[in-house]
Every structure is written in structure tokens, then in C-alpha cells.
Amino acid sequence: MKNTSAEKIEEGWGDVWTWTAIDADTKLIVSYMLGQRGAPTANAFMLDIASRLSTRIQLTTDGHRVYADAVEGAFGADIDYAMFGQAAAACVPACA
């Protein structure tokens, strides 16, 4: 939080991310969540998505490393999962 002073952080100021899962065909939002960009929010978000779906899905994310563990924890092997972008290419050896 480079744009926030220590005093503001103590008062509750800081970063917040909007996590969204959008169906590619219908453009409907399957799930959304507000939170930080770390593993706890990723895990909660993926578990929420998994709880709303009844069939196997294809999921594509950017290369943020916390997604790999969160997806596996929520879906196990019952998902077709891919990452895209330069960050994903750098993550392949570390996330495999």
C-alpha cells in the first residue's frame, strides 16, 4: 500500500480487490467477492464458485500464483484449468 500512510492503515484504509467469475457464454456473474489479493481470499472465492456449479467447467485465470492452490483446493481434479499471460509463463515451473 504505497499510497497510504501508516496512520491511515491503522484506521482501516488500504487495498481492496473485486474478484469476479464471469460465464463466457452468457456473461452472467457466477460469483463475486471483495477482499485482499492473497491466498485466503482466493481460497474463499474458489470455494464459493465451486459451491455454485454442478458440472465440470473450464476456468481460465491470469498468472497470479495463489490461484493454482485455490483452484485445486476447491475443485480437485474435476476442472479444466488454464492460466494466460506472461505471469503464467513464469509460473509454470513453480506451479507445476
Image (spheres, rainbow, N blue to C red):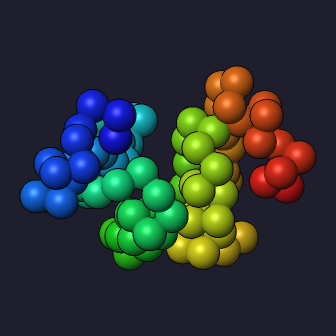
> Residue 91, percent across and down?
77, 42
Residue at 58 percent across and 55 percent down: it is 67
Give the residue at x 34% y 41%: 1
Q: Residue at x 57, y 36 (%)?
A: 62
**Position of 42 compared to 29: left or right?**
right
Q: Pick the residue in front: 36 or 43.
A: 36
Residue 53 visible in image:
no
Q: As drawn, is 15 to the left or to the right of 8? A: right
User: Which quarter of the figure has residue 49?
Assistant: bottom left
Residue at 29%, 57% (x, y): give it: 35
Please provide percent x and percent y for residue 76.
66, 74
Label tally: 0
Q: Depth check: give the residue in front, 90 or 84.
A: 90
In the rendered image, residue 24, in percent from the top left (x then y), is placed at 42, 35
Q: Nearer the viewer, residue 3 or 28?
A: 3
Residue 69, above or below 29:
below
